[in-house]
């Protein structure tokens, strides 16, 4: 049977044509088997696709999962003068696609590729840079639809084919309450599909939440683009031929390899799986096991010259010299970007696994802080299809926070929390009211981790300013301005007297642990600090967190956070969290996405969206809510632990 270059295979080849050899082969590890699905779930791609069909009420779905059959059925339908098809099949040579929407009007075929990406412009000019080239933000989307247009035009040269991107309209206000929940993901055997509620009516579809942009001229720019020394047509034909013949296309190592999915997960044994990434680098560089044991340039934090270093054959961090990094101060306390990079490389070269902590600088920062210290973390969502009438696509929702405090004597408390997962509720203003009641009783220093909390409070501040129906909006806005600073695009500038301190920035400037492999993510920093801090190991090795323990918790009972694996290494605390989904409801996201724990913000957002469905059983709702609370509580406890580890050594 021929192996066709499909839409997904084309996209893969655009990233790296070598991936065509590894894809769909069970012997090769693939870290993104579910990632495209998870992304579509998170950004609403499935829902947007189903909504788009509702705008073509006479459209016919070509149901068959067999692509060859779909091609033949499509051919029969296209003999009609006018017709609209969903999932139409097109085959040209060794190319085969299933199109989201195809509308035939006489001799014209209109192709619509539906994307959850939002726009606020009306023509394809909004996708271009000032010099007329395609913006990097839009390039993958235009390339996708250009490939489809090429295939359709190749199979049906007698038709005039026009290409359109159907995008979410960020200026459109949702016409009704509960629109999001009228499109729900369900399992149908091994397939996933969106079930449209029979309650969906004409009021839900006016005004349109999607906008169609003709991209014919932009497609021509894609066709004129050179790809690895070949024309667009030459490149895709070469990819199709090699894929059909199952022949590997050799690609030189580059910075793109950093995101290669065909590699074993960090810390996982091979278990019989092969690593495409390792195979590529072995054949290109002649590497063996010893070579792969050395960190590479791909691992250097925020390195913007990876390709330049690789081209100079400086791939291992042991090959890099100080002249390659050129570390220099930036006039601020602590490590500059280049100094942190060289610290990372130099520790690898010295086989030094010890953390580097700038005690004096941290002590100087601590002298500025007021007790009690407050550590806060938010969980948020930005549904593409809003939950409430009047809201716009991707309008932010702050549905949860956790709040820990630390007194001057070292007493730690999980002071408070907020979670509103009530179906159809708009939580933002109650969220701020609850946060205000938590933080307004003293002048203690407030901590966040990275910019997310400040950005979201700015967003809610703007929502309040525009909303005339909130009686206490002036009071709430005044509070928000005391604990935040304005973002770059704000109409007015401010910096509050209790502007939150970014713990992420402090870690970046004053603390480097080789165990993080350069990352500053809380999910990497916490396990590293737990493995290096004797104080934390002694403090949290006993079941003293929550319950009868001496550290107050809202959600945990007698929890010991220091638990070790078979090698004696402290386990990542996030792996100790309870299962998220326990029911086997056909709408259960766990059964669909094989996710049973909340380990990151994306999973928390997914859980919140599920809780918006009114028919989630009470038992499952309670279990998911507790899992959300525990996850968010661990985030603020992680921040406390970073502080405690510093306090113990200065």
Image: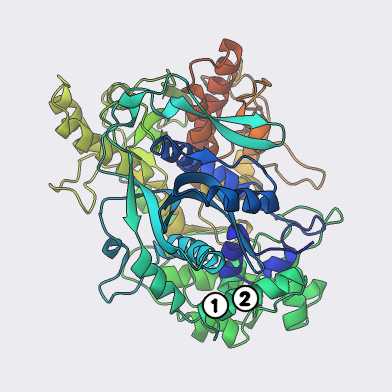
Whether tag 2 and tag 1 are in contact, CB under 8 A, the answer is yes
Q: Position of residue 14 (x, y in %)?
A: 56, 69
Tell me the quarter of the picture where residue 424 sits: top left
- Residue 432 is left or right of residue 248, and the answer is left
Rendered position, 576 above or below 126: above
- At horizontal 56% and vertical 11% (from top left) the residue drawn is 618
Tell me the quarter of the picture where residue 13 sits: bottom right
Which one is nearer the viewer's eye here, 505 or 550?
A: 505
Q: Position of residue 625 (x, y in %)?
A: 53, 21
Q: Position of residue 383 (x, y in %)?
A: 40, 36
Q: Position of residue 151 (x, y in %)?
A: 55, 65
Which one is nearer the viewer's eye here, 364 or 381?
A: 381
- Residue 555 is left or right of residue 494, and the answer is right
| Crowd rating for badge 1 (residues with CA inside 10 Å; few <14, some 14–19, many 20+) | some
Q: State whether residue 227 appears in this view.
A: yes
State the residue position of label 1: 233
- At horizontal 50% and vertical 86% (from top left) the residue drawn is 323
- At horizontal 61% and vertical 83% (from top left) the residue drawn is 314
Rendered position, 571 above or below 431: below
- Residue 646 is left or right of residue 364, and the answer is right
Number of the label disc, if any, that sits on residue 586: none
State the residue position of label 2: 237
Mark 2–mark 1 Cα distance, whole angstroms, equals: 6 Å
Rendered position, 286 above or below 187: below
Which one is nearer the viewer's eye here, 454 or 573?
A: 454
């Amino acid at each position: 049977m021929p192996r066709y270059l499909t839409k997904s295979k084309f996209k893969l080849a655009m990233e790296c044509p070598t991936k065509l050899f590894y894809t769909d082969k069970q012997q090769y590890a693939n870290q993104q088997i579910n990632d495209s699905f998870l992304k579509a779930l998170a950004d609403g791609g499935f829902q947007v696709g189903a909504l788009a069909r509702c705008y073509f009420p006479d459209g016919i779905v070509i149901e068959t999962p067999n692509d060859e059959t779909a091609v033949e059925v499509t051919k029969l339908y296209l003999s009609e003068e006018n017709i609209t098809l969903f999932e139409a099949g097109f085959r040209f040579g060794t190319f085969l696609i299933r199109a989201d929407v195809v509308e035939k009007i006489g001799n014209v075929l209109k192709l619509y590729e539906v994307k959850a990406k939002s726009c606020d412009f009306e023509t394809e000019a909004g996708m271009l840079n000032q010099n007329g080239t395609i913006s990097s933000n839009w390039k993958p989307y235009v390339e996708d639809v250009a490939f489809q247009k090429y295939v359709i035009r190749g199979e049906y040269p007698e038709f005039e084919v026009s290409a359109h991107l159907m995008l979410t309209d960020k200026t459109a206000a949702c016409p009704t309450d509960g629109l999001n929940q009228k499109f729900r993901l369900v399992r149908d055997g091994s397939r996933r599909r969106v079930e449209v509620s029979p309650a969906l009516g004409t009021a839900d579809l006016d005004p349109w939440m999607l906008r169609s942009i003709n991209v014919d001229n932009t497609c021509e720019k894609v066709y004129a683009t050179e790809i690895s020394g070949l024309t667009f047509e030459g490149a895709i034909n070469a990819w199709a031929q090699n894929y059909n013949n199952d022949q590997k296309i050799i690609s030189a190592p580059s910075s793109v390899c950093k995101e290669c999915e065909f590699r074993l997960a960090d810390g996982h044994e091979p278990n019989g799986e092969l690593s495409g990434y390792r195979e590529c680098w072995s054949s290109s560089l002649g590497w063996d096991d010893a070579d792969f044991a050395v960190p590479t340039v791909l691992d250097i934090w925020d390195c913007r010259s990876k390709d330049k270093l690789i081209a100079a054959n400086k791939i291992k961090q042991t090959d890099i010299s100080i002249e390659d990094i050129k570390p220099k101060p930036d006039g601020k306390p602590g490590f500059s970007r280049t100094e942190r990079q060289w610290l990372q490389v130099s520790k690898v070269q010295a086989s030094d696994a010890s953390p580097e902590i700038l005690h004096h600088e941290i002590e100087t920062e601590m002298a500025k802080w007021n007790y009690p210290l407050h550590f806060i973390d938010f969980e948020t969502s930005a549904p593409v299809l809003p939950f409430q009438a009047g809201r716009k696509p991707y309008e932010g929702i702050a549905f949860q926070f956790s709040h820990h405090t630390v007194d001057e004597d070292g007493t730690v408390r999980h002071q408070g929390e907020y979670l509103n997962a009530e179906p159809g509720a708009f939580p933002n203003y109650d969220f701020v009211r609850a946060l205000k009641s938590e933080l307004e009783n003293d002048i203690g220093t407030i901590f966040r981790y990275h910019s997310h909390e400040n950005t979201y409070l700015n967003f809610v501040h703007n929502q309040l300013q525009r909303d005339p129906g909130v009686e206490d909006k002036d009071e709430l806005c005044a509070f928000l301005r005391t604990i935040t600073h304005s973002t770059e695009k704000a109409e007015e500038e401010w910096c509050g007297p209790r502007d939150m301190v970014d713990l992420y920035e402090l870690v970046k400037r004053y603390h480097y642990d080789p165990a993080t492999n350069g990352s500053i993510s809380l999910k990497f920093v916490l396990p590293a600090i737990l493995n290096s801090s004797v104080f934390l190991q002694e403090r949290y090795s006993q079941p003293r967190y929550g319950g009868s323990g001496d550290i107050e918790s809202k959600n945990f009972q007698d929890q010991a956070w220091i638990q070790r694996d078979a090698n004696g290494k402290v386990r990542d605390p996030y792996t100790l969290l309870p299962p998220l989904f326990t029911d086997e409801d056909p709408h259960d996201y766990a059964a669909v996405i094989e996710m049973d724990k909340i380990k990151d913000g994306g999973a928390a957002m997914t859980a919140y969206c599920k809780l918006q469905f009114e028919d989630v059983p009470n038992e499952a709702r309670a279990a998911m809510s507790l899992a959300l609370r525990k996850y968010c509580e661990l985030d603020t406890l992680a921040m406390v632990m970073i502080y405690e580890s510093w306090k113990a050594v200065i």
